[in-house]
Image (cartoon, grey):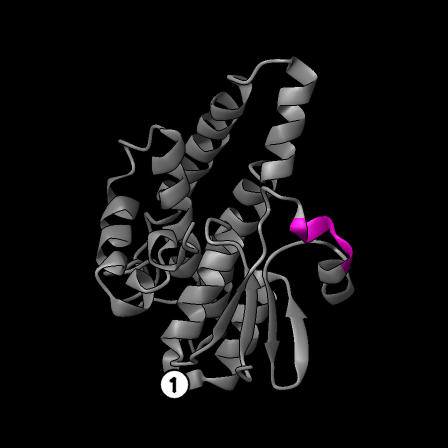
Amino acid sequence: MSEVVLHDYWRSSASYRVRIALNAVGLKHESVPVDILKGEHRQGAYLDLNPQGLLPTLELDGQKMTQSLAIIEYLAEMHPEAHILPADPLGRHRVRALSYAIAMDIHPICNSHVAAHVVELTGRDEARPEWMRRFIGQGLKAFEAMLDDPATGAFCHADSPGMADFCLVPQVYNAERWGADVSGCKRLLEIAERCRALPAFAAAHPDAVRPAD
């Protein structure tokens, strides 16, 4: 087994952003799929690895690491040459704020188990896409406003992709998947498209890692 093992689900946003980060620092890894739809993340074998039952879990440097942003910041600290976080404190704050706006504000309320509970409460299957479209759309519109800043360059911060871009691209994927209206988010869509052309992002795309049926 590889020394770097990522337990993930191909469509998981948190897994997607960690895959991008691993590619960005040049760490080849073995993927161990955990099927959320089959509830494998809530079963004994995976819970022994990650008691929260959340994805992903990264085995690296002899450690089991959880929480996608904590993993990405670890990679940033171990691989400063990748420029995942800016060198200056103010720049790091801005990139973290952008990243948290997606990973801590949009993502938690659009998690699969939250959306499933909304369906249970309403008794309407249509409630799931309605919920997703509303909160992904609102969140990305706020993110677009945050990009109205002199520090924004070709990417979310300056002219090289970093943690904020790693978070943005999976969320744009989700917006497209659920049909959220982000037509007014011209800048973030341009950044996402620019990112998707890069090998680290392309290789991490869900379609590129989806397990064979």
* x, y percent for residue 135: 50, 31
Query: Is 19 positioned to the left or the right of 2 in the image?
Result: left
Instruction: Write the residue at 32% across / 33% down.
Output: 182
What amino acid type is highlighted by mark number 1?
A: Glu
Visible in this render: residue 84?
no
> Mark 1 highlights which residue?
81
Q: Main secondary structure of the magenta part?
A: helix
Instruction: Write the residue at 65% across / 71% down.
Output: 65
Quadrant (top left/top right/bottom left/bottom right) for the N terminus: bottom right
Visible in this render: residue 1?
yes
Between 44 and 83, which is closer to the camera in this rendering?
44
Quarter residue 142 falls in: top left
Q: Is mark 1 on a helix, strand or loop?
A: helix
Q: Please rate how many residues cluster around mark 1, counting C-alpha atoms within 10 Å: few if below 14, some from 14 to 19, many from 20.
A: few
* x, y percent for residue 112: 58, 38
Instruction: Write the residue at 49% across / 30% down.
Output: 132
Q: What stretch is highlighted in magenta?
A: 40-44
Query: Is 192 positioned to the left or the right of 180 in the image?
Result: left
